[in-house]
Image: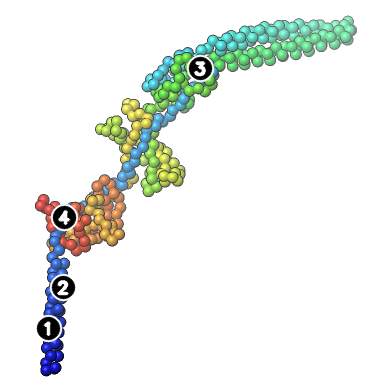
Amino acid sequence: MQSMKKTAVLIAALILLVGGWRIYEAILSSGAGAADERPAVTVALVPVERKAIEDIGNFTGSLLPRSQFIAASKIGGRLENVLVDIGDEVEYNQLIAVLDDDEYALQADRARAELEVSKASLEEARSSRAVSRRELERVRTLFDKDIAAEVDHDIASDRFVAQKARYEVALAQVDQREAQLQEAEVRLSYTRVRATWEASEQGGGKRVIGQRFRYEGSMLTPNTPIVSILDISTLLAVIHVIERDYSKVRTGMQATITTDAYPDKVFTGKVVRIAPRLEESSRQARTEIEVPNPDNLLKPGMFVRVVMTFGVHENATVVPAAALARRDGDQGLFLADTQQMTVEFVPVKVGITTGAMTEIIEPSISGQVVQLGHHLLEDGAPIKLGEDGE
């Protein structure tokens, strides 16, 4: 009886063990089937292209005048008249402002009168010197004949030396008065403020008034600014180049410039200066682009967008930048197998990215890649195309 109970228990345990194993196998097969029957992800495919792609740099900056300076008074006085205003064109040496010149004109007249007095004194001294020379020659002749005494000869000689010295003093006074008159006339000319710039730029055409700082009646001290004068026939587009692009920029490189003021116009320029250092705070280098402005459409202070082409890669492997995905820290593409309707994740090394397109340097690929829907994909996942066939 006891043995029968043991046999029954053993049989029951065996049945439970076999049943449990069957259930375990069913679960495993169910999971594998589910894995093999993953739902296909709807995607859009694009072909891998072989074409030229440009390495383009996009920058923003501001326009500055090629040259600018401040027209200021060189002397103090009351500003009597300003002959120009903001936006007016001026030519080289054009009169732009007048100061009250009464005091300076009086000083010039006084210096001129003092010069005339000095010239008269010089003539008197010249005449006296001539008389004393003739007297000395007469006395010397008589002295040589023992007619005149030695003391008479000495007196005549001393008188000639004195008159000669007087003449030289009068001559020096004339030179001094001429210098004083010249100084007074220069100071008088400073009451007329003119638009002058570097001699090398005299043939550079007209300039324009940028700002006005003083008005009629203002009391000026030396070097008080009156107006600013700008050269806008050619402007400078100032941009700041990041470290990654610094080695690509070269003097003489062509650039295209656009502005918000004239969205339908494209201006051209060339790089004329590149800073030899990058600012430590921004890691950027100041770069200046010369932009011809023959119609004066562009103005200093305008915001500009600058595009420069650094180079062209011919026959490059190109895909849309939107096709790039990242899995497990690697950047890559989902390459489609249109026969099996599955995808393979291929890590890639990218090159130039211009607009919506990216160059693939490694590996060499062809066929089609997933552009839309790759955020739901994993390596080996099944796919299906959208209703439009893409």
Residue 292 position within the rendered picture, expressed as x and y whole percent measured from the top left: 35, 31
Q: Mark 4 points at which residue?
A: 43
Residue type at the position of mark 4: Val
> Is label 1 or label 4 in front?
1
What number of labels is visible?
4
Quarter location, residue 349: bottom left
Q: How crowded is mark 3: few (under 14 residues within 10 Å), some or many (20 or more)?
A: some
* Image height of 57 relative to 269, above or below: below
Q: Nearer the viewer, mark 2 or mark 3?
A: 2
- Looking at the image, residue 359 sits to the left or right of residue 277; the answer is left
Q: Is tag 4's residue or tag 3's residue first in the polypeptide sequence?
A: 4
Query: What type is the residue that disc 2 sits on?
Result: Leu
Q: Is mark 1 on a helix, strand or loop?
A: helix
Q: Can residue 88 be seen in this view?
A: yes
Q: Name the residue under label 2.
A: 28
**Dot 1 amino acid type:** Ile
